[in-house]
Image: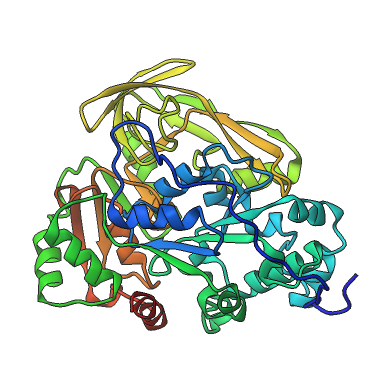
Amino acid sequence: MPSSPMPRPRKTIKKQKAAETAETVVSGSVTLTPCQEQAWALLHGNDNIFLTGAAGTGKSFLLRQYLVGKPSALHPVVASTGVSAILVGGRTFHSFFGLGILEGGIAGTVSRACQNKRVLARLRRARGVVIDEVSMLPGIALRAAESVCRYARDIDAPWGGLQIIAVGDFAQLPPVNANGEERDWAFNSDVWRETSFTPALLRTVVRTQEPEFLRVLNFVREGIVNDEVADFLNMKIVPASLRFEGTRLFPHRNTAEAFNRRKLEELPGAVSVFDTVYAGQERYVDQLRRNCPVPEALHLKPNALVMLRKNDPMGRMQYVNGSLGHLKRIGPDTLTISLLTGDDVEVEKAVFGVLDGNGNEVASAWNFPVNLAWASTIHKSQGATLDRIMVDLSSLWEPGQAYVALSRVRSSGGLFIERWNPGSIIAEESVMEFYRGMEG
């Protein structure tokens, strides 16, 4: 058992040749962009990789393809938050590395984790770890996890010789800033520098191909409000009285939930209520109730606007997480949804699960994978691709909030703005310096 939070193992390691080879990425007609091809080759090497890029460049798509056929015990996926863990079918960073809530600081956290035989066993078994949404992880969490890996694997190398693939965009939502302290960005930590990430930077946005919109998004990402940005946003302002068919993005959850309830009440007809069925260990069920993308009780009416919260399970990509549509028929086991794209799809109930640190499902939630979509929060929209959004950009406070909101939409034709304020378009200068250094 280590007497300090930074145990010094005895062994050294030479990285083995990767078992995987960069062959076919996807079947069918999907073509990778040149930067995706470069990233794909890097993912199949031996280096620690930071897979990053602006919103809509295909980070999640490339990661899904990379993980095809890889056992989760050998290549576990961990996510920075409970919400993102449920959506990617992974487990949280803190549970996998045995960190809990970092009680007692680095020393106490590492000491507890190094006494946990299950944590030690899974770290010794793994070949590499994928960290999703790394931008929302504070540096202190990286430091604790890296210390546990060195001790568990008894190897004197960063992360005990594990290959680390970190995925995310620091220009999007940041780590929680506790007590007004300086933000603990992961890329500023000693562990990040010691890990020596090879950047796999995706530059080509595939979500939209509109040059003007892309330029505006890039300016907003950097916190720049120039004439082009102002003209574009002013052009997107619509009257508050407009009957809007799409999703309104709000910064606060209570506002979004109240808006959805009000819109449902305005529809004629009876409400159908589908209770989410939970199973599993109590403490994990409580976690699932807080983080599941579907509510504890799903209230639906014919013609209600809903958002799909899972990708098409048949692989036909008729819909993805974030697709919008109106309910045409509501059955006990099937919903018929008329998507805004014009297609009709039938959706059955699905499972959302919580995994423990070992990757075992310890709690599940069973219900239709939809929620009311007249409103959502900016935070919950991260990672989704939406068809039509209306957003109020007048009083945002976090770096990246405006950028996340604007970059959710497939095209500028689906973007509507109630009002905006230059003070809501915020970027962290240290983040911009980090990316400028990466590019050159």
Foreground residue among 261 and 170: 170
Q: Residue at the spot x=53%, y=33% of the render?
A: 297
Query: Which image quadrant is residue 251 in?
Result: bottom left
- Left or right: residue 26 compared with residue 423: right
- Left or right: residue 171 compared with residue 413: right
- Left or right: residue 288 compared with residue 436: right
Pinpoint residue 218: horizontal percent, then vertical percent.
24, 68
Above or below for 59 versus 308: below
Residue 257 in view, yes or no: no
Which image quarter holds the C terminus?
Answer: bottom left
Foreground residue among 363 and 424: 363
Foreground residue among 355 and 199: 199
Above or below for 187 versus 21: below
Q: Residue at the spot x=74%, y=65% of the render?
A: 149
- Left or right: residue 46 compared with residue 54: right
Pinpoint residue 72: horizontal percent, then vertical percent.
64, 43
Pinpoint residue 53: horizontal percent, then vertical percent.
36, 62
Pinpoint residue 83: horizontal percent, then vertical percent.
54, 50
Above or below for 22 versus 30: below
Q: Residue at the spot x=48%, y=55% of the render?
A: 43
Q: How is the image coloured?
A: rainbow
Residue 252 in view, yes or no: yes
Which image quarter holds the N terminus?
Answer: bottom right
The mark tally for this picture is 0
